[in-house]
Amino acid sequence: MSETQSSETHAANEEFERRPVPNSALKGPGKFWGMYAGEHTAGTEFMIGPLFLAAGASIQDLIIGLLLGNLLATLTWRFLVTPIAMRKRLTLYYQLERIAGGGAVKLYNFVNGILFCFLAGAMVTVSASAVGVPFNVAFEVPEATFGLGSPQFTLIVLIVGAIIAAIACKGYEMVARVANIAAPWMIVVFAACGLVSYAQMKSGTPFTWDDAVRFIQEKNGVQEFGFWKIVIFGWLCNGAMHFGMADLSIFRFARDKSSGWAPAIGMFLGHYVAWICAALLLAAQIKLHQDPTANPGMLAWRAIGWTGIVCVIIAGWTTANPTIYRAGLAFQGILPGSKRVVMTLVAGIVATLAGAFPNLSGQLLNFVGLYGTVLGPMGAVIFVDFWLMKKLGLREEYASASGTAFHPAVLIAWLLPVGFGLFLVFTNKTFGDFPAYLVIPCWIACGLLYLVLSKLTQKKA
């Protein structure tokens, strides 16, 4: 092998955690379309779709509200994240380190990594629920948030988590490859689930979406999940990844801007078609079995048998893979001298342990809003630093430019809005029931604070 070929091979296998991605390692749009299809037509959909039904959303509001919300999410990825990712070609974590300094960004990296691990853990639970069905191992949700399932279910979670973590350790190339292979098939299976469930609801005595909502609410109490809640949830359930700029770590590999439209396939086939199809699974189960339990594996099994089981397993896997990959990069940001593989393995272990608590997966409607509120605002720091600092006569990437290890403006600008947001979540019922309302207000407040504090601190410097 020539020296040039060796260099290209090394570039293809490296993750470039602390330097810009070189041209030789850039990837075409196909890699991104496949990854976003696999990540967002995935395990969460088997949980979130039924949770919409259980929360009392009407089918009309769901169809129109998700259409608008997912369009807004796609535009945010394309025009907020992609231009910065392609210009800088750095991970979120290293870019923040250059702005805030290694000392200031460690707390954020830790919180970021832990929250991504909990999200990945919910997906490990989803996959495990399907593995357990043929072995008659029940997916039972204990009342306590951190209550364990049965010993057999916990063992399945540990095995599934170990396999998922091993693949995530292989790096972005392997994560994207798995998603590209799995995504087309999973999309077809989700559609089949929806069609079969709809046919089951219409066969014999007709049974409507509203009938299913009434059945659940008679058992669990009346809830409301209206049109604007659906729009905001569809837009901001991935707030940490677009408003929070976590997907700078993904799009830094993009060769051209068209890759920035790749989230559309995840939003409209995953967060639109798959959510509605998964909700229909629960509606059909209520009609046929009078069972309102949102058990992903059992829902798919009752609709399409073994194909459904395999789909749920792979769906959880393709979501957890890139999430653990992101968490590993966050942990590596805490210990810059560490190896990415080791930190990804740590993230996989934490995610697997989180997956052993089945109740976490049942809290996804609230959890994704909460993690967007906590992680999303830091993206405003990157946005302001990239677009506004030079225009206002201030230095961008201030920590790197000045040689400081701690730029307090960043930490203060992040902690104040997030701290107030969390206070509202835990003291106000409106925000406690739906934390996603806070993502954009906290993002704007963080950006403004960072700008004001930078003007003050840089002038003193």
Image (tube, rainbow, N blue to C red):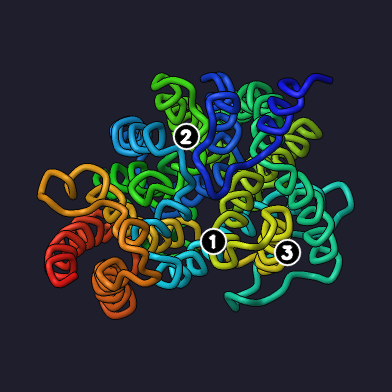
Q: Quadrant of residue 369?
A: bottom left
In the rendered structure, the answer to whether residue 457 lies left or right of residue 156 reads left
Q: Which residue is mark 1?
A: 333
Q: Residue at image x 53%, y 25%? A: 23
Distance from Cα at disc 3 to Cα at disc 1? 18 Å
Near-viewer residue (190 or 224): 190
- Mark 3: give few (<14), some (14-19) or many (20+) Cα within 10 Å: some
Q: Residue at x 41, y 51 (%)?
A: 95
- The amino acid marked with disc number 2 is Phe
**Separation of residues labelled 2 and 1 (CA atoms):** 18 Å
Residue 312, x across and y down, in percent:
70, 41
Please tell me the numbered disc located at residue 317: none
Question: Quick one: SS at disc 1?
Answer: helix
Q: Which of pointers 3 and 1 lies earlier in the amino acid sequence?
A: 1
- Judging depth in this view, the residue of 161 and 222 nearest the camera is 161
The secondary element bearing badge 3 is classed as helix
Q: Earlier in the sequence, mark 3 or mark 2?
A: 2
Which part of the image, by quadrant, shows the C terminus? bottom left
Rendered location of residue 274, percent (x, y): 53, 33
Amino acid bearing label 1: Gly
Task: Report helix, strand or loop for mark 2.
Answer: helix
Q: Which residue is mark 3?
A: 349
The residue that appears at 76% across and 26% down in the rendered structure is 6
Residue 36 in the image: above or below residue 392: above
- The mark closer to the camera, 3 or 1, is 1
Q: Is residue 410 left or right of residue 212?
A: left
Q: Is residue 433 left or right of residue 270?
A: left
Question: What residue is rendered at 16% in x and 59% in y?
Answer: 451
Depth check, mark 3 against mark 2: the one in front is 2
Callout 3, which amino acid? Ile
